[in-house]
Image (cartoon, coloured by chain):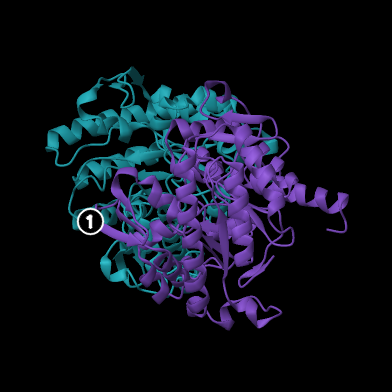
Chain colours: A purple, B cyan
Amino acid sequence: MTLPHGAVETPVFMPVGTVASVKAVPQHLLEELNAQIILSNTYHLYLRPGHELIRRMGGLHRFMSWHRPVLTDSGGFQVFSLNELRKVTEEGVEFRSHLDGGLHFFSPEHSMDVQIGLGSDIVMAFDECTEYPAEYTRARKSLDLTLRWAERSKRHFDAHKHEVPWGAEDISPGPAPCDLRPSLFGIVQGGMYQDLRREAAERLVEMDFPGYAIGGLSVGEPRELTREIIAETLPLLPKDKPRYVMGVGYPDEIVEYAEMGVDMMDCVLPTRAARHGLLFTSEGRLNIKNRRFAEDQNPPDPECQCMVCGRYSRAYLRHLMASQEPLAAVLNTLHNLAFYLDTMRRLRERLETTSPSK
Amino acid sequence: MTLPHGAVETPVFMPVGTVASVKAVPQHLLEELNAQIILSNTYHLYLRPGHELIRRMGGLHRFMSWHRPVLTDSGGFQVFSLNELRKVTEEGVEFRSHLDGGLHFFSPEHSMDVQIGLGSDIVMAFDECTEYPAEYTRARKSLDLTLRWAERSKRHFDAHKHEVPWGAEDISPGPAPCDLRPSLFGIVQGGMYQDLRREAAERLVEMDFPGYAIGGLSVGEPRELTREIIAETLPLLPKDKPRYVMGVGYPDEIVEYAEMGVDMMDCVLPTRAARHGLLFTSEGRLNIKNRRFAEDQNPPDPECQCMVCGRYSRAYLRHLMASQEPLAAVLNTLHNLAFYLDTMRRLRERLETTSPSK
């Protein structure tokens, strides 16, 4: 997958940098971890520091000094999480800021403007994330809205995609001139109803996006259902375009879905869990705060080659958590991201070997 | 100055790593900053995780994976900060933990045992830090106690200094076998009374320590008084041994004192101020939270060569503070330490040139 700010090998896991920072990790260490692309949140950046400010700073890449690709979500998921603070109409969503209660309005067109202003490499269509559980008629209505919004997103995006704040000098020396522009991905919704998912996929494929996401998962449904929806939806999306499952998951999930053919995934889990002392390792999950690690001189994960496992003991990481030291978040996050990114790297190597034609 | 864990060029500024971590900075970045020696706090480490645990882990260097020299304070200063929670007798100090209110007792002998157990390169004598202001008779009495405790510290240290948790394999390949042992520094007290400072210096020099500190400064007195006490005390201490002023200061202060002949200084200022958004630069102090930096694309300090100034803008650092991102503490601390350490490096080069015989 070649994007304006560089190539991305798939399947790929995208660390989440909500407000233009992957929490607690300096950008040069993200590069050392071989993070290829990060996700940033449109809703948060729109509120603070504001997409117009970021546009004036030359876009997200320059603003945060991250020169590899960035994907932005559409703001839809966050806005829909503000249950009591929002009002949905055909036109868009009115909502109140979680920061100061101020009134704002997002439409498909506005979401495109914000994401283009941020200068994303991959822009996501503005959708309604259907809640779980949802009745069939509710999911049906929600999907129809999402599909109308997808059309509006695409129309507006195509008309304005040249307005990104970066130019030829910022981007990777690439092949075709069309690569200078961001890409807009469509999002398959439809709740947990397979016929709605099928309809969504077909309608979006007709609209011809350069990539497709499966959204509305990891919203509280049992994991078997997540798996089932992915398994049934994936074959309906073109194999030669990136297929992205949003907001998953645990290490074994991302492996499972990647083996099923998913190309892209993102999740706050490795970074958020790290800040709470939960480490993902080849031996399973470790709650590093546990007393039993107080004198454990082993690295967090004896199989891991990361900069944390190569240097620090469980005893030390446990001490940092117990003492509420800021370094705990830094080191735990570095390890968890290394574990996720390395898991995907090994998977890519394995898939490469087993299907050399791919 | 050659210590068991390596050589230190003086004058040197020592970053403070209170509980075995320089807050928010991974050890490999401290190395990249060319930090030569760090200070750790005996009181805090004694309470958590405990010096016996750290001894079992092979000492502080192994525990925190920092292989350069460490100086520990005696615990005295922290214990004396616990005004309402302590009781001083000839024998030592009874105090309550700030963590859980538990009762503890520090004597000169116990402070030596703790610091030896931690495996410091430089151990500080257990002293009473005289409060400011203090009446003459109070300062006199306090100094007498400090001097008796210095003798007891030295006697106990000499009898037990071989009990450090590290061995020949941990230390820098050095010249004499005596270098395998930590050093004990005496601390000059005496409040703001020059005759008491003189007496303290003379008595400690008689006891023959390998290095001397001037303590009891930066306790609330005006800066001219700090300067005066340093200026008058310094000539009373042997020039061929390290002279250390504890707990200072602002960038211009450390330059001033180093030019007066001070070899070692430590202070929480660069790290603590960083976490509150105060940056030290060649253009003075910047409160990076200030609105006027919101769109400032300049590096924090245009003259600075550090990894933060080479990559990030004031606008980005301001955004990180405004958004309370954990990366703010990391990047601000990295810059402030770089500024302090670089200030001292330039000063060493200048002193080297102007007095090549030194």
Q: Is residue A308 left or right of residue B283?
A: right
Query: Most extreme residue toward the left, as rendered?
Result: B135
On the question of residue B33 being in view, the answer is no
Closest to the observer, A344 or B201: A344
Relative to A216, does residue B161 appear above or below in the rendering? above
Q: Is residue A251 above or below residue B45?
A: below
State which quadrant residue A279 falls in.
top right
From the image, which quarter does the N terminus of chain A lie in?
bottom right
Image x and y of residue B177, in percent: 65, 38
Most foreground residue, B155 or B62: B62
Identify which residue, A71 or B115, lies in the foreground. Answer: A71
For label 1, the residue is B228
Which residue is the extreme one toward the top? B103
A37, B122: nearer the viewer: A37
Question: Where's residue A46, x and y in %?
Answer: 37, 62
- The x and y percentages for residue A221 are 53, 34
Q: Quadrant of residue B291?
A: bottom left
Q: Chain of mark 1?
A: B
Where is B111 relative to B91, above or below? below
Residue B201, given in percent of the width and then of the height, sits at 32, 43
In this rendering, the answer to whether B326 lies above or below A242 is above
A338 left or right of B100 in image: right
Q: Amino acid at mark 1?
A: Glu
Quadrant (top left, top right, bottom left, bottom right) of the C terminus of chain A: bottom right
